[in-house]
Amino acid sequence: SHQTISVGPIALSLVTMARIRQGAVGAIAVALCAAQFASAFTFVSNGNSHAPFTTQLNVVSDETAKAAEAAERAKAVMEAEEMLSKAEAAGPGIKDNKLMDVGGRPFPLSMIVGQDSIKQALLLSAVNNRMGGVVISGGKGTAKSVMARALHQLLPPIEVIKNSPFNIDPEGEFGLDDFTKTDLENGGIPLAERDTEIIDAPFVQVPLNVMEDRLIGSADLEESVKTGKTVFSPGLLAKAHRGVLYVDDINLLDEETANILLNVVTEGEVLVEREGLSLRYPCKPLLIATFNPDEGELRDHLLDRISVSLSADAQPLELEQRVSAVDSVLNFAGSGKQGSADAETALAEAIENEDDLKTAIVFAREYIRDLKLAPSQTQYLCEEAIRAGCQGHRAEIFAVEVARAAAALEGRQVTSEDL
């Protein structure tokens, strides 16, 4: 005998959950739920085309058929449980912060025509992380974002604690997050004895519409429910530590996001106070910001925290330079063969130049540790700041850091040219 019941909404909800809850664990959990739900009933379509979500419950009286079906269902449930346990065993507790590799290579910095002052400023900021970053203004199509991505190609790889979502240095030189501090206080493995790995310096771009939880991180509700304890999901700032933090159209950021970036540049760390979480983690990236002055000026309180501000429109290109720039772009290919034999030669020279710059940056970062200005040189910079009517002391402080970076890149002491 058959009894007709309406179970369409239940079946529809299972399918919807499977589509919404993407990911291995979510899909397996829904499959497990469906398998267990199916263990109680056998569904048979009633053939009614006017009621697609109506099925008939077939009560089977044959004990042999019921036993076979129960065995199949039990097998499906066991397989789903095994897959679920494997997924849970691989769960990190903190969300993975690996960035997607989009393939190809950016346009080389040395192949960009003109903009020598901006390229020099970017190289100096790569040497000295105490400069506070570089902001580039200019109209559309002036290679602002191209130069930012080209500099990232020059940064040497960094050594981090293995599986650290905050890119923690094995010597703790750039600061420790609260998770690592707590682990060390509780008798955890010392930093010097932990496994390390070499990764590419991260490049993180902050979108204009970024939310606070995506920027600084927040509690992962799904993982927290599964584990029974609060699990923190790091944000973009955690990924950017010791790498490049690129902000395009920084003048268009909302006030809240701008204040967060301001605190990062000033303090070098991120404080998270939300959803029952209270923690700190280091964030000392190389900040590169760009904006179009036609769309609005940069806020003074942000500009005051960044050491170098240059305009890509300051030195317009001559006709021959514009022709050379166009040819370079048209014949360049991010991967594969270049557009011409001259482009192949130019790229080979650019790659060789990049290798030399990478080596120079590595040595300069070590050389700058013991590099100091003479008292007379510091006095000269202060006098210049007074003559220019600068408010506060950031002008001469940043000038000192820029001079140290320029000398370190050349592998010598600070001279009048650096000042």
Image (tube, helix red, strand yellow):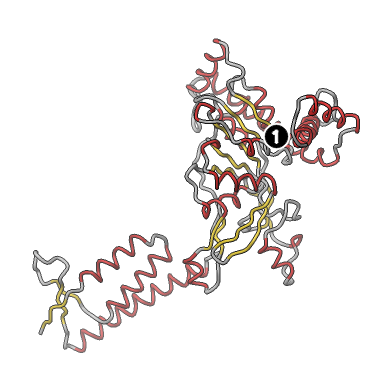
x, y percentage for residue 79? 38, 73
In the rendered image of this protein, does residue 246 appear above or below residue 190?
above
Quadrant of the drawing holding the C terminus? top right
Q: Is residue 232 left or right of residue 418?
A: left
Q: Is residue 400 left or right of residue 44?
A: right
Q: Residue at x 52, y 43 (%)?
A: 254
Q: Residue furthest right?
A: 375
Tally of numbered discs: 1
In the rendered image of this protein, does residue 315 appear above or below residue 52?
above
x, y percentage for residue 335? 50, 33
Near-viewer residue (135 or 96): 135
In the rendered image of this protein, does residue 191 appear above or below residue 65?
above
Near-viewer residue (386 or 217): 386
**Which amino acid, mark 1?**
Ser
- Give residue 388's quadrant in the image: top right
Q: Residue at x 52, y 41 (%)?
A: 253
Near-viewer residue (22 or 73): 22
Q: Is residue 13 left or right of residue 413?
A: left
Q: Is residue 162 left or right of residue 397?
A: left
Quadrant of the drawing holding the N terminus? bottom left
Around disc 1, counting alpha carbons within 10 Å, would you say few (fewer than 14), some (14 to 19), or many (20 or more)?
A: many
Q: Residue furthest top?
A: 319
Q: Secondary structure at mark 1?
A: loop
x, y percentage for residue 320? 56, 10
Determine which residue is flagged by label 1.
307
